[in-house]
Image (cartoon, rainbow, N blue to C red):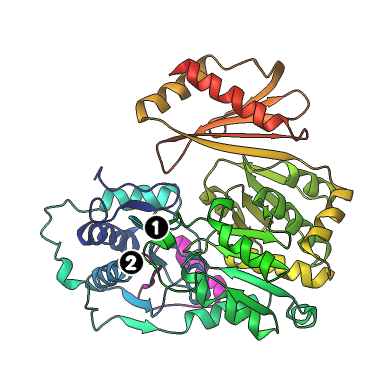
Amino acid sequence: MQDIKFSTAGFRATTADGLTAQSIQRLVYGISEHILEHPFYGFKGTGYQNFCKTQGKKLKNPLVFVGFDTRFLSKQLAYVAANALVQSGITVRMAEEPLPTPVAEWAVRNECAVGAVVITGSESPYYVNGLKWISYYGGIANNEINADIEKRIPAENAQILKASSTEFGSLNAAVTVTKELRKSYLTHLEKIINTRALKKAKLKIAVDPLFGSAKNYFRPFLEKYNITVEGIHEQDDGLFGATVPNAGPVSLGELKKLVITQKMHLGIACNPDCDKFGLIDSDGEWISPNEIAPMLLHHLVCNKKLKGRVCRSVITSNLIDQVAKANGLMLRETPVGFKYITDLMITGQYVMGLEESGGLAVSNHIPDKDGLLACLLVVDMLATEGKTLKQLRKDFYKKYNPLFDQKVSIPKTETEINRIMEWLDIRPPLSINKTSVWRIDSTDGFKFILKGGSWLAIRPSGTEKLIRLYAESPDENLPARLIKEGKKIIDSIV
């Protein structure tokens, strides 16, 4: 059905408009059929069965975890999803408390479930909600899975549909409610994080879960290892403090104040479902994922001795390329959308995968992005090195050349977006800012790579009606000029 479509981040829509009890139930019925019938990703599929063999497990019935974030109606819609799965003969274990997406992904891999449903709008505004389907490999569904589910979604008038608002408060007796998911996940993190270093470091960390599910994870993990924690936005608020709950600099103003006034070593934050991260250093400066991810890669390779390849999206900073090359790591570039990175992380050959918007995955963990782990790895890095983030950045740039980036989003209609993309395909600019375009990468949108290595990228958003412009350069002042030139190019087309 055309009214329910997956984007790069699952299904999302305005609550009580495109997102209703009925739309969730319809979508879950499509997922149920996918589970029962798909020859590779389904319960009897070769992919899932082979994965379970490698895990040494064999389930008699398909198992699905169901979780929800702190958003308005998320828990009630999770009830609808759980009830619909049970009606299809699927075993359901539902989280008792708000469940981060990466924790659901860990549970799927750890217990060899066929998948998980998480009701979440991630970092969307408060009036938007959605559903993420996580497949057996512990990552968000890929394009093939999404297409298969979409074709199985029943029509609005299908007789199978029974959900209504009266079901929001009741859960089928066949659904098992579990309290164990957080404990299992945090125990797993203890194998990744240098907890001995944490105990000795005497760090002071400010945490901001942005009214999301990280509130149940940051504090208990850090305080267990003698870290002093000061937190904000740890209570429930369906309006997210009247802000858009992403972990970017605009939303972390109060975390910045907390770090400065309480003289904290670091501020860490996650969006509501914890798949992306944000950081504030001791001076109150927001540190871009484009900068922190290369530092973490250096930490993983040099301090934790991890080996493998590296992958990044096409518009992620080339700073990661420097670190990869210096340490003899092969690098792979992907289209935008973390599912492409997940496809590579599943192979077990990659030590890290990252995207510029704050998504990061590491080896020996789930193959998808995990904002909780990303934040804790930065704390781990400070504790292991015994230095502040400011000192670590200074040391890092003694080894690698700094790059500067900028990003803007411009609202456009679907017609305008299509026209811009078609025009750039036919008549791409041959010079930008009076510099020759050396190469054009059309992996995802158009990335115009200039002589000298600076670049400008123009691409449509995968989730909103926006044209996004990205620029990077070793010249601190050039990204702003490239963005300005990009706007001129767009204005000349529409």
Q: In the image, what residue type sits under mark 1?
A: Gly
How far apart are labels 2 and 1 at the CA level?
Answer: 9 Å
Crowding around mark 2 (Cα neighbors within 10 Å: few <14, some 14 to 19, many 20+) is: many
Whether residue 59 appears in magenta in the rendering, the answer is yes
Residue most extreme to the right: 398
* Residue interval drawn in magenta: 45-72
Residue on which the image places disc 2: 74
Residue on which the image places disc 1: 121
The one of 88 and 316 positioned closer to us in this rendering: 316
Q: Where 291 sits versus 181, above or below?
A: above
The one of 359 and 307 positioned closer to us in this rendering: 359
Q: Where 274 sits versus 315, above or below?
A: below
Secondary structure category for the residue under label 2: helix
Q: Where 414 sits versus 56, above or below?
A: above
Secondary structure category for the residue under label 1: loop
Looking at the image, do the residues carrying marks 2 and 1 touch, with CB atoms under 8 Å apart?
Answer: yes
